[in-house]
Image (cartoon, rainbow, N blue to C red):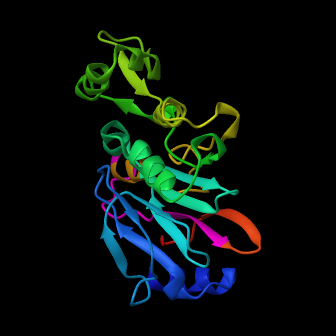
Amino acid sequence: MLDNRQRLAAELGIAAPRFCLIRQVHGNKTFVVTDPPHLPWQTLAEADAMVTNRPGLLLAILTADCVPLLLMDTEAKVIGAVHAGWRGALAGVVATALDAMVALGAARQNVQAIIGPCIRQEAYQVGAELRQQFMQQSAANGRFFAERGNNTPLVSHFDLAGYVAQQLMHHGVIERHIDDVGLCTFLCQDRFFSHRRTTLLEGGQQCGRQMAGIWLSPPSPPGPLFHRWRGGV
């Protein structure tokens, strides 16, 4: 893993101490990054989102089915990176990340968002308990669940990326500013790691991770990054 991260840093031409990582816990906390880590690859905080307005820092998150969400306001020069699994998304991690960006000077109507590779509805079968939690938040969330199959009861499939996009719009991001790459980590076996595929279909215990990141490097605008190394990063 460390080997892959060092190779990635070298390929991008970004020093390892500039990579900002967090210990992701499927919550809704957003960490405001003001300084680089003291040690290379050190986690800065227990959180599921980061924001900064400081140039030269790469905000990096790791996923293997959850949504990697990258945010940027190029006018205010404020960026964010969000790890949004279903728990964090339901708990409001998208909202806390946007709030933190606004506190740094961003404007919601100027925020651009990229939804990266994640498990998609076709492959994301979920139980009744998960569906019920979203329905308790709002009956309107029913549109993110599709009932499929020939058995009774039917099986629910959850549109996690669609829910994240809805949360962005609910909290002020303009729909045309949301770009979804549309790729499925579960189905694109040759391109992405998938925790669900590894544990359910392949019988494995260890699963690699994709790294998604975004940085401010003046005078260039913010740039997104999605990267996968064999063995994980």
Q: Nearer the viewer, residue 211 or 20?
A: 20
Residue at point 46%, 75% (across, down): 20
Q: Nearer the viewer, residue 92 or 101?
A: 101
x, y percent for residue 65: 45, 49
Q: Determine if residue 18 is in view.
A: yes
Q: Determine if residue 193 is in view.
A: no
Q: Judge from the rendering whether residue 116 lies leftward or rightward of residue 103; answer left or right.
A: right
Residue 213 forms part of the magenta stretch: yes
Image quadrant in which you'd find residue 153 = top left
Q: In this rendering, is residue 227 above or below 123?
A: below
Q: Which residues are magenta?
A: 200-216
| Furthest residue toward left | 129
Q: Nearer the viewer, residue 178 or 95?
A: 95
Point out the image quarter for the N terminus. bottom left
Q: How many marks?
A: 0
x, y percent for residue 134: 31, 25
Q: In this rendering, is residue 145 above or below 91?
A: above
Residue at point 53%, 48% (across, down): 185
Residue at point 49%, 30% (across, down): 170
Residue 99 forms part of the magenta stretch: no
Residue at point 39%, 48% (across, down): 96
Q: In this rendering, is residue 137 above or below 85?
A: above
x, y percent for residue 83: 43, 54
x, y percent for residue 157: 42, 26
